[in-house]
Image: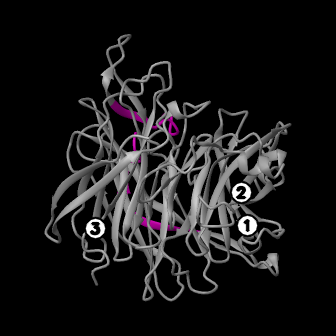
Amino acid sequence: MKSAILALLVVLTPYFLRAQTVTSFEGADASHLAHPLLDFDPNGAVGTKQYMQWVNVYYQAYDKVTFAPVWATPQPGNLPWQLSVMKNCYDLSGDGLVMFDRLASRWIVAAHGLPGGGEYYYCVAISNTDDLTSSSLSWYTYEFPLTPVLGKNSKGDVYFPDWPKFGTWADGYYVSFDLLDVDNKYTPIGVVACALDRTNMLTGSTPNPMQCFSNPKPIPTVGSLYLKHSLIPADVEGTTPPPAGRDEFMVSIENPPNDGESTTSNSINVWAFHVDWTDPAKSTFTDTLRTVPAYTPGCYNVSFPLRTVCVPELSTNPANGYHYEVDSVGDRLMPRLSYRNFGTYESLVVSHTIQAGTKAKQTGVRWYELRSHDKGLPTVYQSGTIRPDYTNFRFMPSIAQDQDGNAAVGYSASSSTTHPGIRASWWNLPSKTKPAELLIQSGTGDEQNSGQWGDYTSMTVDPVDGCTFWYVNEYFTKNQTTTLDWQTRIANFKIPTCGAK
């Protein structure tokens, strides 16, 4: 493990005139893995004692104070299910997630399994302790059959359950999937959202059958491009649960109409998932459009809406002289949908990549705060766009909120004059201060062998102090051409005034 780097950044804003300290250390890199993948989706979460990270298809954890790794080498992602001899989860196809259930102080590892024969499973492992160094650490493991709820296309092939996203809530765990047509260029034709029986899963008991809903309903055998794909389930931040009986919420983008002309949208979707474990017939899943300031999704292409590759890197392709470009993943909202219960109101924050500024295709980070009072459906309370300059493309964001209402969003930043690096911005939501940007890690290399730049990152808040933000993202120290040379960086920082009240 590389030594920790302490960078002192002075941030001046009208609201706070204090030094902002960012600490970062090296996470799991391609060189640490026996079989690294090109598309590795860095994500993780902070718990009570460790920070745990996932890169396809491995996980590793680090002490929160010393940053020492918990295991000598990253662990194979399928290890919990191998120990339980759950063979449907031996072959994990990626898109793995690490979460920390703050209401129960338990770790969660989840990914979809592909045992073969057109069968799909969702694999979830829950720790029996919050301490990953404990000699008594074990995992409660589950394999949920997905094939019956995914639907089939006109050829009889099961839709692929892509981009699963996970949220912890008081009455269940919630997961969403995009439905991709394997016979039509993996076009998304709908979504499936499922509730998992958290109560029994936390004790290692047999869970009630998962409850799932689709949109469209029923799932079509011939589907067109679905404009509201990639749902993000709300994930509880802090240790105050939602009010009793509160529905789980999910959000998704509402992409521009696929008409070959439209480039803007002024809506996002807010989904309410009500689960009734006693009488599943009373469970519901509903969608409501919420109006937001108009936006163009990052790198949007009217001819190919799903191809959101336009973020330039410094190096150029000798074959054509153009700068190498990577994917902004601008066609969807990005995890997390961070939820906090402040007592007098509930607040949810989420972010995504949009076109920003006057420079053609330049991308920035759009964020939203949704609030709810008296158990009502969340509405958009405020929003903003982070674009401190007219040069850098900012993309792949993840947002969270501390106990004092300070929001922080981490993201990648790149341009034709700068290698991709890692940055973050923070501001105070109640006081509506101006975002201040922090440098986390400068990159010194580009990804030249693919336009893929992961699929998501993670910003979470320490459940112990309620203030310290932890963020993980990727970068390169040299140009990646044939050998996989990607690296990850884990950073933490705290807003100086958090907890002073």
Looking at this view, name the residue that lies furthest to the top. Answer: 319
Please give the name of the residue rendered at 19% of the width and 54% of the height, measured from the top-left corner: 9
Which residue is at the front of the view, 271 or 458?
458
Give the mark nearest the N terminus, 2 or 3.
2
Please give the label number shown on residue 495.
3
* Residue bearing the label numbered 2: 124
Residue 434 falls in which quadrant of the image?
bottom left
Q: Is residue 330 left or right of residue 279?
A: left
Question: Looking at the picture, does residue 247 appear above or below residue 162?
Answer: below
Which labelled disc corresponds to residue 196? Answer: 1
Within 10 Å of disc 1 (Cα), the crowding (few <14, some 14-19, many 20+) is many
Span of residues in magenta: 287-312
Amino acid identity at mark 2:
Val
- State the image quarter where residue 232 is shown: bottom right
* Image position, residue 369 (x, y; %): 39, 69
Q: Mark 1 near mark 2, Cβ–Cβ under 8 Å?
A: yes
Residue type at tag 3: Ile
Is residue 257 something that shows in the picture? Answer: yes
